[in-house]
Image: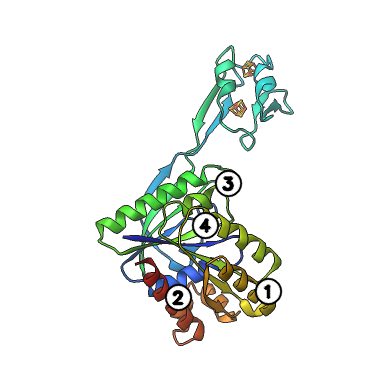
């Protein structure tokens, strides 16, 4: 079983619509949405959830105001300035600022502070028309997305082994942060989806550096290349110069958007389109490249 991960250095490159299009051609594959902060592959795949699991995130402290003597010790020691008086002169903790270090819990002289792990994050195993999908939903403000990415990838690989599948196809998170690092680590092949814009060039360079630092073979795809052909050529030259082959340059096409509106991938919406043909060829290149 081999893992292929689709990444983009930034949001808005069309990575998920490319992943969904690849999914339409992928045989013997388990799908995994690694973009746990803003998962959207399920919007196209429309899966039926068969398993729901809680992911326990970071710790959050709260103050029992009935016990609190307002001594102020916790407020002075919180390095994240999460503790303050509210308008009723009660000592409270802002959950969005609390980093869960649990220092305040230890130093409160009257044990008025307790910490609890956030249990508002979920990950799912679902059935879709293309195969099994493992995906997740992370609570707003939660900061353990890297761990949740590792969790969904682990389960996707287990399922692939159980079902004797050949591939796991990961729809990775945008950017190069903690979640992207979790998505790259240990994968067998990366496809970078980029677009010809100033930020597109900047972000694909950072992504390429990240992927190459892990020594993972990578290919690229330039989406909407015709919105700036000159810049697309600049990206292609840069990537080819550092040993990353551009497998396809996909033109802007409003059918891609129309397909998404009706929850379809482009090969389903218009199987005879040139874009569908290009994506099919990319899938074959990926499969050949991973052998
Ligand atoms: S240390 Fe305890 S008693 Fe003192 S202000 Fe904080 S919560 Fe209240
Ligand atoms: S757990 Fe740490 S970050 Fe959160 S309020 Fe207490 S001291 Fe501040």
SS type, badge 4: helix
Question: Crowdedness of circle 4 by 10 Å Cα count: few (<14), some, many (20+)?
Answer: some
Residue under label 1:
231
Camera-near label (3 vs 4) is 4
Q: Residue sitting at 49 percent across and 42 percent down?
A: 120
Q: Which of marks 4 and 1 is nearer the N terminus?
A: 4
Image quarter of residue 291: bottom left
C-alpha separation, residue under disc 1 versus residue under disc 2: 21 Å
Residue 243: x and y in percent read 53, 67
For label 2, the residue is: 282
- Judging by the rendered image, the residue that carries numbered circle 4 is 212
N-term-proximal mark, 3 vs 1: 3
Q: Ligand 2 is found in which quarter of the picture?
A: top right
Q: Which residue is drawn at 68% across and 74% down?
A: 231
Looking at the rendered structure, the secondary structure element under dot 3 is loop
Say if 160 sits above or below 102 in the image: below
* Residue 269: percent from left, percent from top: 47, 81
Cα distance, mark 3 to mark 2? 35 Å
Camera-side residue of 15 and 285: 285
Q: Which of marks 2 and 4 is in front?
A: 4
Query: For numbered disc 2, what is the local secondary structure?
Result: helix
């Amino acid at each position: 079983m081999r893992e292929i991960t689709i990444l983009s250095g930034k949001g808005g490159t069309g990575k998920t619509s490319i992943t969904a299009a690849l999914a339409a051609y992928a045989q013997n594959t388990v799908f995994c949405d690694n973009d746990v902060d803003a998962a959207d592959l399920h919007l196209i795949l429309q899966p039926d959830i068969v398993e729901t699991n809680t992911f326990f995130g970071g710790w959050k402290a709260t103050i029992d105001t009935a016990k609190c003597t307002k001594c102020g010790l916790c407020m002075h020691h919180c390095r994240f300035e999460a503790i303050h008086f509210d308008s009723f002169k009660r000592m409270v903790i802002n959950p969005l600022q609390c980093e869960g270090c649990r220092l305040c819990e230890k130093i409160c002289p009257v044990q008025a502070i307790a910490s609890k792990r956030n249990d508002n994050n979920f990950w799912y195993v679902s059935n879709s028309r293309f195969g099994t999908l493992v995906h997740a939903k992370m609570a707003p403000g939660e900061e353990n997305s890297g761990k949740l990415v590792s969790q969904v990838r682990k389960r996707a690989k287990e399922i692939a082994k159980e079902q004797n599948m050949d591939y796991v196809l990961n729809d990775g998170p945008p950017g190069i942060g903690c979640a992207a690092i979790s998505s790259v680590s240990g994968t067998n092949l990366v496809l970078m989806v980029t677009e010809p814009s100033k930020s597109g060039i900047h972000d694909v360079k950072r992504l390429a550096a990240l992927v190459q630092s892990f020594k993972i073979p990578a290919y690229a795809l330039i989406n909407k290349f015709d919105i700036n052909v000159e810049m697309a050529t600049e990206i292609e030259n840069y990537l080819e110069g550092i040993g990353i082959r551009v497998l396809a340059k996909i033109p802007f096409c409003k059918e891609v958007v129309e397909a998404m509106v009706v929850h379809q991938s482009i090969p389903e919406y218009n199987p005879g389109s040139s874009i569908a043909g290009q994506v099919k060829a990319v899938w074959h290149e990926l499969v050949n490249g991973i052998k």
